[in-house]
Image (cartoon, grey):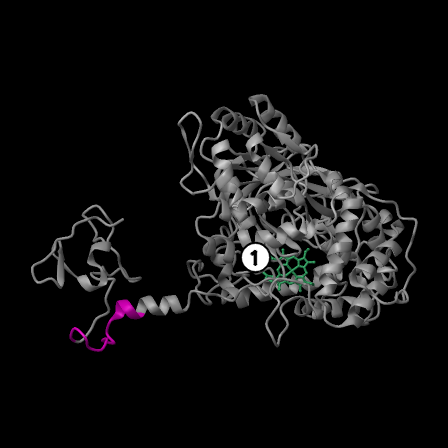
Amino acid sequence: MAKSKRNKSENGNRVKFDDQTVNQAQGGETHQLASDDQPVLTTQQGTPVSDDQNTLRIGERGPIALEDFHFREKIFHFDHERIPERVVHARGYGAHGYFENYESLADVTAADIFQRAGEQTPVFVRFSTVAGNKGSFDLARDVRGFAVKFYTKQGNWDLVGNNIPVFFIQDPIKFPDIIHAAKQEPDRAFPQAQTAHDNFWDFISLMPESMHMVMWIMSDRTIPRSFRFMEGFGVHSFRLVNAEGESTFVKFHWKPKLGLQSVVWNEAVKINGADPDFHRRDLWDAIQMGDYPEWELGMQLFDEEFARKFDFDILDPTKIIPEEVIPVRRVGRLVLNRCVDNFFAETEQVAFCTQNIVPGIDFTNDPLLQGRNFSYLDTQIKRLGGPNFTHLPINAPKCPMHHFQQDGHMAMMNPQGRVNYEPNSWDTETGPRESAENGFRSYPAEEAGPKLRIRPESFADHYSQARQFYISQTDVEQNHIANALVFELSKVEKPAIRSRMVAHLLNIDEDLANMVAAGLGLKSIPEAAQAAQPTRQDLKASDALSILKNAPQSFKGRKLGVLVTDGVDADLFNALKEAAEAEGAVLEVIAPVISGVEASDGTWIEAAQKVDGGPSVLYDAVALLISESGAEALLAEPTARDFVADAFAHMKFIGYTEAAEPLLEKAGVSLDEACVKLGEKADAEKFVETCRALRFWDRRSKMKAKP
Ligand code: HDE
């Protein structure tokens, strides 16, 4: 960066850069002036700047002159750099890509985006957490937002979903309450990005309708390994409307091509310290490497008759339609292939609005959806400062727009010419006019009835699907749900809240309630909570609800952490690298020093992490390629011990050389079939194949503490 044009001057205090004078006291040698072929730094008005290091003074040690417009402009702009963060989903990360339609869906929808097989539509996607503020950590136990803006040829369609298919509440009037209860408590302003506190569980335990969502948030769905390994859901029932005006109900799903994977809670806690940006880094890295994340768009399609017959109200956002009842039809794929150029301009300023739909798609009476249609537009005006946020490139449609809306803060696209109203008689040939045929038309659903503040009777079953979710999980996952509940409720100070939650759990599953009660050390088991409707015991388990039943048998897209020392067997290292790359995984080197190590054949291996900065929680599997000569120094390094002990405790596959055995022993590892000895090149391939199982859950039965 510094071009050494320094010219030590005779007077000592001043240094000459070409014809310019720079004060040496500020370290004149560290900055560079524009050369002939470089742009000159300017103010926002384009005025060239001569000195960006010093304010304008009256005398060398005198006051700053108010006329220093460059200083004033720079500070003024800096003072206004922040906009209000999103009141929920403040922390997020976005990327560009496209949606590719597999087949024409003209039979069910007139939406232009779904008419032609193979057609690609540009998209922008933003993933987020809900409760944390903007600077919070990525692996909070929290719902993830999965918001997609499709720039279709007939306008922007925003599908603003989550990675969980249900929500806490049935009526939007409760949204401020649930969010207030979940976020930091108002007097103390903590805890940050966690639901493990009194206010949250106080509210939840008074809201039986949230019990289905509680099962999901206490499962590993809320600690995903990566955005790339999680599902997305539109949550509400929407309508598709075809050219004949016929309506079909639809629930939207996003299915990750890499399958589902989550971390375990003990890992999440440690990842938040080791790399608070774990998820955004993962997305950024994958896209930069050309390993583009993909999801398939799925639709559960059903008609009025099914809606009438279904055991639950399809308008109730606390209910799912099991995939076994209506299979998910995969209709296209979403590919994220471009990182943003500027985080603020794109990810921060993107304004999703559930009201943004296109002809061929329509709302239903899901009360939450209707409430959202008010909230999102309202919130964007607050966040982005005026009605013209649609002019920002990230929000502007990519199809032609013609309207007579004008003026307002920061207007950048005012219509030209004399005509700014309609009807008019000026531009009858060329001016924009409404089109009954091509314009958006609401599905003419018939609505009638008395005006009431009321919750429909069909929304009254709060426990049956919560139970269905729980019984659909593997043993490991059921245990994680119980542990998560014990963890969260142990952070609650008021014992009555803990009991109240156990009372609800009794309506979901007795074993679960007993496990949680035991974990909390409850002195007595409370009565089951009063239920508006009894829990149905006949709902069948649904495999689609389990993460582990949907894990891929592949190590693709995962990360292998290889701890190396000087003298590492070069052949073995190279074989492991080749095997990992052939699988589509990434190998990252961790070494005692960041510069790397010298391998047995004299080649240099660069390191990505120093051992204390690259704990094993950042990797899906680990290998310890330790040489005889390097073993001793690592034994004295506590973080090397933690590296191994954590990998073992987190059920990871561990490859190791003979020289690593003392380190394994020191870490308390009792070798099992997921610990693979690496000697020959062939072992490397075998090890990577083993890693396809992602975790060795059988280890749990032998461990006392079970993460
Ligand atoms: Fe949101 N939600 N929400 N929400 N939501 C917002 O809009 C709101 C709900 C979701 O990456 C806000 O632009 C109400 C369900 C995502 O920018 C706000 C209700 C689902 C994002 C808002 C809900 C979501 C938001 C805050 C109950 C899953 C982030 C900032 C009726 C289907 C989008 C903003 C992004 C953001 C209101 C419930 C998903 C305040 C009133 C259900 C992914 O308008």
Residue 23 percent location from the top left of the image? 18, 63
Residue 419 percent location from the top left of the image? 46, 61
* Relative vertical location of residue 12 with respect to residue 624 in this rendering, above or below: below
Looking at the magenta stretch, what is its main secondary structure?
loop
Residue 650 left/right relative to 606: right
**Does the stretch in magenta take in 622?**
no
Q: Residue at x 22, y 76 (%)?
A: 65
> Number of labelled discs?
1
Closest to the observer, 611 or 345 = 611
* Relative vertical location of residue 287 with respect to residue 381 in this rendering, above or below: above
Span highlighted in magenta in the image: 59-72
Q: Residue at x 48, y 41 (%)?
A: 633
Q: Which residue is mark 1?
A: 137
Residue 483 percent location from the top left of the image? 75, 55
Label 1 Cα neighbours within 10 Å, binned few <14 / some 14-19 / many ≥20 = many
SS for tag 1?
loop
* Relative vertical location of residue 178 with respect to residue 394 in this rendering, above or below: below
Q: In which quadrant of the rendered view does residue 692 lie?
A: top right
Identify which amino acid the numbered label 1 is placed on: Phe
Residue 523 percent location from the top left of the image? 85, 67
**Does the stretch in magenta take in 66?**
yes
Q: In which quadrant of the rendered view does residue 21 lie?
A: bottom left
Image quadrant of ligand 1? bottom right
In the rendered image, is residue 445 in sight? Answer: no
Q: Residue at x 47, y 43 (%)?
A: 609
In the rendered image, is residue 265 in sight? Answer: yes
